[in-house]
């Protein structure tokens, strides 16, 4: 790696070689990656963004994170925090110029403590979500955050983007699951808010400020998270529905009949499931061929499996009588339930196998979703004959992954390059008309950074800029993400 200089408005230029030696002294040479060793950290999961970095720093403790941040602040070097590198909006990929470091939290994966009486668990930011789920389960508890990337995403990244997942309907986003944070500020100070209190009315809620900030205000190094009792029974059903409106009616009926035990409600359009069946035929997707939409429901019951099954069967019988369900199956065992969920979680992978696509992670009032889908589907079909829409998502909380695939025979890369700006404008304008959001759970990153000002209140943007300037006056924390 050739020597270069970096500078900040408040310091003299610092030689890159000297700076790297300083980091090696702080972390050990084996934990400062350059060259080939750094490459896996420089490209995003979708292979849409590739950047360069002075190095990848891999601290193992909060004290080491703070030391690295202080060194970067003194040298004026930007920091790109990175967890599992599963961002879908380029939020953890450095810029091509290569003037920043990637701060990987992957070594910080320890479970610090479990407080059974307080129903909390405290883990470090690099803890893989699946590891956290298993640790809780082994102790007889439930950590309910769940998503397709849980085998590689980290809790720090989940917090940085306020990730949602498949059980938001019952348990909320990651924000609702977090009671406390440990954060290293852009000045290299450690802010300890890990107490796990459910009530602390002593001023501004700094915890919520950092959650969802995508590493632009500081580095989350640990979190205290809520645990829940394991349900006594968990049943999964797969239902064919004739329309989005019917899916919404089924959701209302399920809420009425199941109440808080309704923990999952996913809607999937026929073409989304067709892609899964095409690319992963071993999964044997049911019911989709003769219906425009399918719904996946999960019922987590605190009484018994018999009670859960009776409620589920009664719900589906009523739904069929009312015409919002045309056919349905209830998983007979855990293996069948896991297979149904695997089908839902394979949609993104199947879409990637089909080719590059234009992703939209949007949220809408549930009451507006049917009209949004009808109008936007029609507008896209009129603008681009043969366009294929991969529509699926967490209907229970109004979050759609409304993705657009090239027509058959059109090169996906050409389609992305030529059509993405116009398609984004069409979709996002429709989202705005229905009072929705252009980002529900993926964040802004660099993908939507330049689009955000067109759909966010100017007053809100001014306040966000003021917060950024107050907390990170040097602008070293994940620059070019979220805000211009």
Image: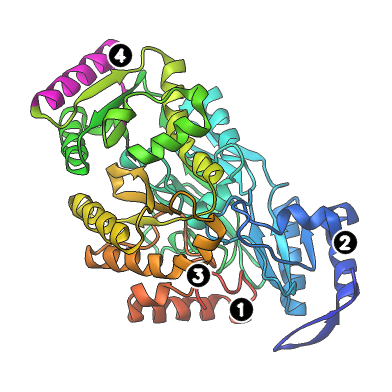
Tell me, yes or no, whether the highlighted magenta stretch contains residue 389: no
Quadrant housing the N terminus: bottom right
Q: Nearer the viewer, mark 4 or mark 3?
A: 3
Q: Are marks 2 and 3 in contact (CB under 8 Å)?
A: no
Whole-number angstrom distance, CA of label 1 to CA of label 4: 54 Å
In the rendered image, which residue does mark 3 sit on? 482
Q: Position of residue 252 (x, y in %)?
A: 16, 38
Question: Which numbered mark, 1 or 3, is in the foreground of this view?
Answer: 3
Query: Who comes first in sequence, dot 2 or dot 3?
Result: 2
Residue 8 to residue 121: above or below: below
Pick whichever of labels 1 and 3 is earlier in the sequence. Answer: 1
Mark 4 → mark 3, Cα distance in angstroms: 46 Å
Task: Assign a secondary structure to mark 4.
Answer: loop
Q: CA distance from mark 1 to mark 3?
A: 13 Å
Q: Nearer the viewer, residue 99 or 274?
A: 274
Residue drawn at x 56%, y 52% as measured from the top left:
157
| Residue 129 located left or right of residue 67 | left
The magenta segment is 296-321
Mark 1 = which residue?
475
Q: Quadrant of residue 435?
A: bottom left
- Evaluate if marks 1 and 4 touch, with contact meaning CB atoms under 8 Å apart: no
């Amino acid at each position: 790696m050739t020597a270069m200089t970096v500078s900040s408005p408040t310091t003299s230029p610092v030689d890159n070689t000297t700076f790297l030696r300083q980091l090696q002294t702080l972390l050990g040479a084996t934990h400062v990656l350059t060259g080939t060793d750094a490459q896996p950290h420089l490209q995003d999961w979708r292979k849409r963004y590739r950047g360069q970095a002075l190095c990848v720093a891999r601290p193992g403790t909060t004290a080491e994170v703070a030391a690295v941040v202080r060194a970067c602040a003194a040298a004026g070097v930007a920091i790109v925090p990175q967890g599992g590198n599963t961002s879908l909006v380029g939020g953890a990929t450095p810029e091509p110029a290569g003037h920043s470091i990637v701060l990987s939290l992957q070594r910080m994966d320890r479970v610090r403590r479990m407080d059974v009486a307080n129903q909390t668990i405290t883990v470090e930011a690099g803890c893989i979500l699946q590891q956290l789920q298993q640790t809780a389960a082994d102790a007889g508890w439930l950590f309910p955050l769940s998503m397709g990337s849980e085998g590689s995403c980290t809790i720090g990244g989940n917090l940085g983007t306020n990730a949602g997942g498949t059980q938001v309907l019952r348990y909320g986003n990651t924000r609702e699951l977090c009671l406390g944070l440990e954060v290293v500020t852009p000045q290299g100070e450690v802010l300890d808010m890990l107490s796990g209190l459910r009530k602390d009315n002593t001023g501004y809620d700094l915890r919520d400020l950092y959650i969802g900030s995508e590493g632009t205000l500081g580095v989350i190094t640990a979190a205290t998270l809520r645990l829940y009792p394991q349900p006594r029974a968990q049943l999964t059903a797969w239902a064919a529905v004739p329309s989005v409106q019917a899916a919404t009616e089924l959701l209302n009926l399920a809420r009425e009949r199941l109440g808080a035990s309704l923990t999952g409600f996913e809607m999937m359009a026929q073409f989304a499931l067709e892609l899964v069946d095409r690319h992963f035929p071993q999964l044997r997707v049911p019911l989709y061929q003769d219906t425009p939409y399918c719904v996946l429901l999960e019922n987590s019951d605190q009484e018994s499996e018999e009670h859960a099954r009776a409620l589920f069967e009664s719900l589906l019988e009523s739904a069929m009588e009312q015409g919002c369900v045309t056919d349905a199956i209830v998983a007979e065992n855990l293996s069948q339930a896991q297979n149904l969920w695997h089908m839902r979680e394979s949609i993104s992978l199947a879409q990637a196998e089909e080719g590059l696509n234009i992703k939209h992670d949007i949220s809408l009032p549930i009451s507006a979703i049917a009209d949004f889908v009808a109008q936007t589907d029609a507008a896209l079909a009129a603008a681009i004959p043969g366009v294929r829409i991969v529509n699926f998502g967490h209907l229970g909380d109004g979050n759609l992954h409304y993705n657009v695939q090239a027509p058959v025979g059109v090169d996906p890369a050409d389609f992305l390059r030529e059509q993405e700006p116009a398609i984004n404008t069409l979709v996002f304008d429709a989202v705005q008309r229905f009072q929705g959001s252009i980002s529900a759970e993926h964040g802004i990153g660099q993908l939507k950074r330049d689009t955000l000002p067109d759909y966010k209140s100017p007053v809100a943007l001014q306040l966000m800029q003021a917060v950024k300037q107050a907390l990170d006056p040097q602008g070293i924390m994940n620059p070019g993400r979220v805000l211009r």
